[in-house]
């Protein structure tokens, strides 16, 4: 595999229909042997290695780590919200399928290079399901170069790609429920209408600062506020994503039917909304041409978590890439761009989505919607 520094790439995965491909040790495939790793290098994955050994004949230099270890060997970055989520969701689903077992520790590799931590958001999300998260660092700086062997290990290298849609939906249902419970939020069942009997539609503008923020956030807010005021029952909330704690993010999204936000990691929070909620996404100029497949990340996520992606705004205005022949440079250039607005387009789009959600809620107004307590069963 030319250019691939994933030091475990030659092993065969265990594949179950519609579930994430994984490696499990010890197993029949490993002939009962344990997984052992010499993997402390944080800059060159080719310097890390693995071996299999029977527990009764481990090398004298080996350290045996007891209990279950989750090993993520991913091309995704565990620090980033969306990237980290893609890397850890398969472990959540595997746990659900195997008696809700919890790991003793995590081992993280990015492109085969050891990482010492998850991002705070990813870590806290995993704590809602698994409790305390311990990331193994293999005694950084220790002179002992012996391997670490695992009593039990589950290795994921393919993220959510091979999981079926129902498996993804169940995993996100669990994480949504666990996060709400962790933060002390319990959705109330029953009808949600205002004093005049109209369904309440909770519209959230989830803002961000810096790259891919709105050029004129005040003007965009005014457009959404004006359209919201035209719909009886609509309530607008404007939230600054960087100012929200983990539980603040859960609370804001839990109380959102429509989230409108620029493309960015903050949109990962969409799965904290109820299934069937709506997402409106905004991109800076150049992202359609140079954003690669990553421009569809939150469209995919909406489908995977049960949301309705209501389309996107691709800003046609802004500076052109100064080096159009260099795709990677253009990606970085536009990634740092900001999002303009078009008052007529934004107003028409917002009105359409609001009325669509209003009709859906009116259809459900006579029904009692109860929180699915089974989603937290694991």
Image (cartoon, grey):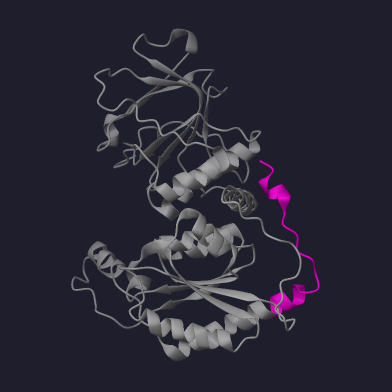
Report the residue at 63% width, 51% height from top: 177
Residue 96 lies in quadrant: top right
Residue 335 lies in quadrant: bottom left
x and y, in percent, of residue 253 in the image: 55, 63
Task: Using the image as rendered, state which of residue 140 and residue 244 is in the foreground.
Answer: 244
Report the residue at 32% width, 41% height from top: 4
**Residue at the limit of the structure toward the bottom, as seen here:** 344
Report the residue at 69% width, 43% height from top: 377
If the image is split into quadrants, where does the C terminus sit?
Answer: top right
**Residue at the limit of the structure toward the left, as seen here:** 322
Q: Is residue 90 visible?
A: no
Task: Using the image as rendered, state which of residue 228 and residue 59 is in the foreground.
Answer: 228
Q: Considering only vertical position in the picture, is 336 above or below 129? A: below
If the image is split into quadrants, where does the N terminus sit?
Answer: top left
Report the residue at 70% width, 80% height from top: 359
- Magenta part of the protein: which range? 359-378
x and y, in percent, of residue 35 in the image: 45, 23
Q: Is residue 92 visible?
A: yes
Q: Considering only vertical position in the picture, is 57 above or below 75? A: above
x and y, in percent, of residue 79 in the image: 37, 48
Say whether residue 25 is magenta. no
x and y, in percent, of residue 353 in the image: 58, 80
Say whether residue 376 is magenta. yes
Give the mark count.
Answer: 0
Task: Using the image as rendered, state which of residue 54 and residue 95 is in the foreground.
Answer: 95
Q: Considering only vertical position in the picture, is 22 above or below 306? A: above
In the picture provided, is 207 more to the left or to the right than 225?
left
């Amino acid at each position: 595999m030319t250019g691939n520094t994933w030091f475990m790439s030659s092993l065969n995965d265990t594949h179950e229909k519609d579930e994430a491909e994984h490696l499990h040790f010890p197993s029949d495939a490993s002939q009962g042997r344990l997984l052992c790793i010499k993997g402390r290098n944080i800059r060159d994955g080719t310097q890390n290695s693995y071996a299999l050994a029977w527990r009764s004949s481990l090398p004298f230099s080996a350290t045996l780590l007891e209990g279950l270890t989750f090993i993520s060997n991913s091309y995704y970055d565990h620090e980033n919200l969306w990237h980290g989520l893609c890397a850890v969701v398969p472990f959540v689903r595997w746990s659900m399928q195997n008696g809700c077992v919890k790991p003793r520790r995590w081992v993280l590799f990015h492109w085969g290079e050891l990482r010492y931590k998850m991002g705070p958001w990813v870590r806290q999300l995993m704590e809602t399901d698994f409790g305390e998260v311990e990331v193994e660092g293999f005694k950084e700086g220790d002179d002992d170069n012996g391997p670490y062997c695992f009593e039990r290990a589950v290795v994921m290298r393919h993220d959510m790609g091979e999981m079926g849609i129902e498996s993804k939906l169940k995993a996100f249902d669990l994480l949504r429920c666990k996060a709400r419970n962790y933060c002390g939020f319990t959705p109330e069942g029953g009808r949600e209408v205002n004093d005049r009997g109209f369904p309440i539609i909770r519209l959230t503008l989830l803002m961000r600062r810096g790259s891919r923020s709105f050029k004129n956030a005040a003007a965009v807010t005014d457009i959404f506020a004006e359209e919201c005021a035209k719909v009886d029952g609509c309530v607008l909330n404007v939230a600054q994503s960087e100012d929200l704690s983990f539980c603040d993010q859960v609370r804001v999204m839990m109380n959102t039917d429509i989230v409108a936000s620029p493309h960015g990691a903050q949109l990962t929070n969409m799965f904290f909304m109820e299934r069937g909620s709506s997402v409106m996404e905004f991109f800076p100029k150049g992202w359609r041409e140079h954003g690669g497949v990553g421009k569809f990340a939150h469209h995919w996520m909406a489908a995977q978590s049960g949301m309705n992606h209501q389309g996107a705004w691709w800003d046609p205005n802004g500076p052109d890439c100064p080096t159009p022949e260099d795709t990677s440079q253009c990606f970085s250039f536009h990634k740092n761009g900001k999002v303009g607005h078009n008052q007529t387009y934004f107003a028409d789009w917002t009105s359409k989505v609001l009325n669509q959600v209003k009709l859906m809620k009116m259809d459900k107004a006579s029904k009692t919607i109860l929180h699915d307590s089974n989603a937290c069963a694991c």
